[in-house]
Amino acid sequence: MNDIVIKTQGLTKYFDDYCAVNDLDLAIKRGSIYGFLGPNGCGKSTTMRLLTGLLTPSAGEVKVLGYDLPNQAEALRLKIGYMTQKFSLYDNLSVLENLQFVAQIYGLSRGQRRERLSQLLAMYHLEDKQHVRAGSLSGGQKQRLALAAATLHEPPLLLLDEPTSAVDPENRREFWERLFDLSDSGTTILVSTHYMDEAERCHGLAIMELGKKRADGSPAQLMEQLKATVFQLTGAGLRQVGKQLADLAPVISTAQIGNTLRVLLTPGLPDAKAWLHQQVAHINIEQVKPNLEDVFVASTGVGYAKSIQN
């Protein structure tokens, strides 16, 4: 059995003269949780829609669950679950009525509907809310309802477009526990996110910017392969130190985190720590291991431009 359930080569999408997705190659394994990390406008949502068949590529090849897109998009839709950024179920229907409606769309028999809806209401802690209108639910409850609807037909592939953007940290953690349950059962999950802690939970990750994939791998691999040296600075006047260092050529980025200043330097300096001491002699300097935010900064924007120049 082929372990690659999503394969793209040169996937590209233009909207008039604007390139939303640019020459994207993906190979995503069965049962994995794969994330798209990037700022607004980087191509995450457009990529999701291309992989569901909702959009037609301008160029490139796409195969999802063995289906060639866009030609077999209609057949693919019965095999996937898709959860959009915005709550897309019916506010004026109850929780149970929404799930019954989705079950009918996917052609579940009356017996299948009864059994599956009972499972989902219990699994997502919605039994006491089943007769409440969806529009009256909290953000976390709406999120659980949307996930229940997306997985009602037990799809082998689940696509989640920034699914936790409107919920609190506790609900986000609970949501991710459900995703790992689904992954353990063999479901392949694609999720786009703005949150570093969520990106770190993924088995694989693509960092995207302006439609391009800037980095790809597991979070651990990306941190290990980072082409930058990371230092943590402590001492007085860190705000001024950060501004002083920010414009110097070897400095990819500076970021103040509490009482410390995190500094990323381009590789190749013969003695990076000594160079830093020359710039800010009164500051304590310690080299530290990269984290995923360091990878993101070095892979996008000014950080990316500086890192590829060296």
Image (cartoon, rainbow, N blue to C red):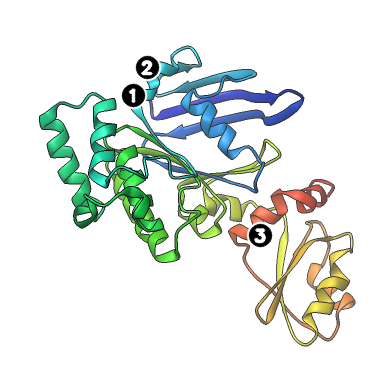
Q: Nearer the viewer, mark 1 or mark 3?
A: 1
* Count of labels in the image: 3
Disc sitting over residue 78 in the figure = 1
**Contact flag, marks 3 and 2 (Cβ < 8 Å):** no
Crowding near pointer 2: few (<14 within 10 Å), some, many (20+)? Answer: few
Q: CA distance from mark 1 to mark 2?
A: 6 Å
**Contact flag, marks 1 and 3 (Cβ < 8 Å):** no
**Contact flag, marks 1 and 2 (Cβ < 8 Å):** yes
Whichever of callouts 1 and 3 sits on the residue coming sooner in the sequence is 1
In the rendered image of this protein, does residue 177 appear above or below residue 38?
below
Q: Amino acid at mark 1?
A: Leu
Q: Nearer the viewer, residue 101 or 305?
A: 101
Find numbered disc 1 in the image and state the secondary structure of the residue it sits on: helix
Q: CA distance from mark 1 to mark 3?
A: 39 Å
Please identify the quarter of the rendering in which residue 106 is found. Answer: top left
Whichever of callouts 3 and 2 sits on the residue coming sooner in the sequence is 2
Residue 12, position in %: x, y?
65, 24
Disc sitting over residue 75 in the figure = 2
| Residue at (51, 60) in percent of width and height | 197
Disc sitting over residue 123 in the figure = none
Q: Which residue is mark 3?
A: 294
Q: Amino acid at mark 3?
A: Asp
